[in-house]
Image: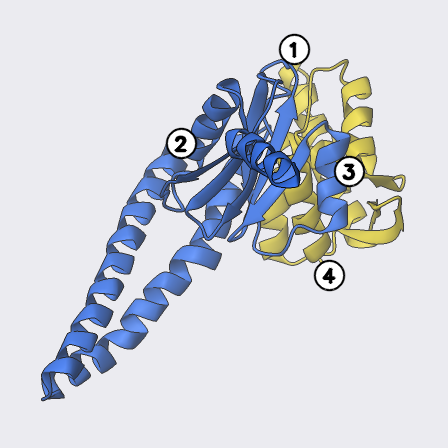
Amino acid sequence: MKDCIKIVEENRLMKTKKRIFKFFTIADYIEQETWLTKMHQDGWQLVKIMFPILFVFEKTNQTQAVYKLDFKNKSADADYIQLYQDYGWEYVTSCEGWNYFRKIDSQVSDEEAEIFSDNESKIQMIQRIYTHRLLPIFLLFFGNLPLMLNVRNNVTSSVAHYIVTVYFTVFILLLIFGVYALWKLVKLKRSLK
Amino acid sequence: MLTEKLKKSYVPMTESGFYILYCLQTPQHGYGIGQRVKEMTNNGVSIGPGTMYGVLSKMESDQVITFVREEDKRKIYVITDLGKEILAIELKRIERLYKNSRGESIDED
């Protein structure tokens, strides 16, 4: 009997939770907002994000919600969350400097569905992403480049060569994402000016 | 001290920046400022939480406003002497703009 209840319980849990792997670069926050809003409309509300790519959802009956992301280099402290709450935004979770907010209301006006009310503050957020996310990526890459090239040319064993190649590939990927994000953010910023 | 660099970044001010600094002549927290601005402008100007937080943080780090105390997790700020100096310059500029927009010219200052 106890086991039976356990299985039923597990089944219930399985149906109420959903995990989705999805990758967004740091420049894709508007796409993330749209996707999360759509997921909520389909009955899945965001619970948390593990590593930057695993989104955990749970079933909800409330199907009208708006999601917004704010980038902040410091942790989301109490007064920050309180300010959003005062404005009717529920704090959902944080991940890698991004803070996720949700407003549940079928009657929100366009104005109330925005967290930034002017272009200057939207540009300022892009500026924060530049300084606290993109700059470190480029510094990391170019700081490591001479070392990587040097090691790569001097390794003799095939295992070491393999490791260095993997390491090198990861860095190249990082650079590609970095360049893509930079290009997209520059474009976004230009459209706001 | 009001440096040229600071003056350049605050004069002219953004609409949100102006209303926030103006309201902080009396101590207030972020949401309170937002509500006050809505009243003053008959809902003409509304400042979102992201914008509010960004402007308050920047103004605090530039020492244009200062943190007074915390009340129920809400940070209360007030304008500093430096902020008053900037506000005075900005008010003068807006007054000139207003007079000129009505076809009046500026007398001595």
Q: Vertically, is B8 above or below A168?
A: above
Q: Position of residue B99 (x, y in %)?
A: 70, 20
Badge 2 is on which residue? A31
Chain drawn in blue: A
Which residue occupies 69% across, 57% down?
A: B61
Which residue occupies 65% across, 10% down?
A: A107
Q: Earlier in the sequence, mark 3 or mark 4?
A: 4
Name the residue type under label 4. Answer: Met
Q: Position of residue A78 (x, y in %)?
A: 76, 48
Q: Residue furthest top?
A: A107
- Report if the CB atoms under discs 2 and 3 are less than 8 Å apart: no
What is the chain letter for disc 1? A
Badge 1 is on which residue? A107
Q: Secondary structure at mark 1?
A: loop
Q: Are marks 3 and 4 on the same chain?
A: yes
User: Which of the two discs, 2 and 3, sits closer to the camera?
Assistant: 2
What is the chain letter for disc 3? B
Name the residue type under label 1. Answer: Gln
Chain drawn in yellow: B
Which residue occupies 27% across, 47% down?
A: A180
- Tell me, for residue B1, which label it has, or none: 4
Is A165 left, or right, of B9 in this rendering? Answer: left
> How far apart, in angstroms, are the residues tagged by discs 1 and 3?
24 Å
> How far apart, in angstroms, are the residues tagged by discs 3 and 4?
25 Å
- Report if the CB atoms under discs 4 and 2 are less than 8 Å apart: no
Q: Nearer the viewer, residue B104 or B18?
A: B18
Q: Is residue B85 visible?
A: yes
Name the residue type under label 3. Answer: Gly
Badge 3 is on which residue? B30
Q: Position of residue B58 (x, y in %)?
A: 65, 50
